Image (cartoon, rainbow, N blue to C red):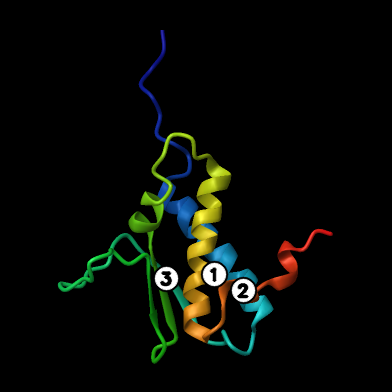
Amino acid sequence: MTGPELAPVVTRAETFDRIVGDTAHYLVGMWPDELAGVVFQVADMPTDRDLPDRLPRWRVDRDDRRVTLFRIPVERVTHSPEKDDTDRRVVVETAVFRAVGELIDKDPWDLAPDRFRHW
């Protein structure tokens, strides 16, 4: 006989926060001058009353030096049974790279050019 199912030790929200933090830390290390003082934060959803036709996955505020990642819209990209933890991590990292690229006017691929060269 077994007891009730236990909740996961780590929630999806905690995992999302950790991935955003790890990725932001990596990018700040790569671009310390451009990202000095930038605040990275996570919210479940945007709270704007007037949203564009597409639900934003992040928001960049250049004046306040703030990047906000929206967990639920980003996670919905991976809402597919064949996705695994690695796929989900790549989607979150990609969102962070794209948001930072928008903040500092760089192509996301240029933020870590040697990271993807394995030859």
Q: Which mark is residue 97?
A: 1
Mark 1 Cα shell of 10 Å, populated few (<14), some (14-19), many (≥20)? many
Dot 1 or dot 3: first in sequence order is 3
Amino acid under disc 2: Leu
- What distance separates the C-alpha of mark 1 from that of mark 3? 14 Å
- What distance separates the C-alpha of mark 3 from that of mark 2? 14 Å
Question: Which element is circle 1 on?
Answer: helix
Residue 119 point in image, percent of width and height: 84, 59
Q: Residue 41 sits in which quadrant?
A: bottom left
Tell me: 44 left or right of 27: left
Tell me: 43 left or right of 31: left
Question: Which element is circle 2 on?
Answer: helix
Q: Which mark is residue 41?
A: 3
- What distance separates the C-alpha of mark 1 from that of mark 2? 8 Å
Q: Cβ–Cβ below 8 Å for labels 1 and 2?
A: yes
Amino acid under disc 1: Phe
Amino acid under disc 3: Gln
| Circle nearer the viewer, 1 or 3 | 1
Mark 2 Cα shell of 10 Å, populated few (<14), some (14-19), many (≥20)? some
Write down the residue under mark 2.
Answer: 27
Residue at the location (53% across, 62% down)?
94
Residue 90 point in image, percent of width and height: 55, 54
Residue at the location (48% across, 83% down)?
103
Q: Where 71 sits versus 37, above or below?
A: above
| Circle nearer the viewer, 1 or 2 | 1
Q: Where 26 sits versus 33, above or below?
A: above
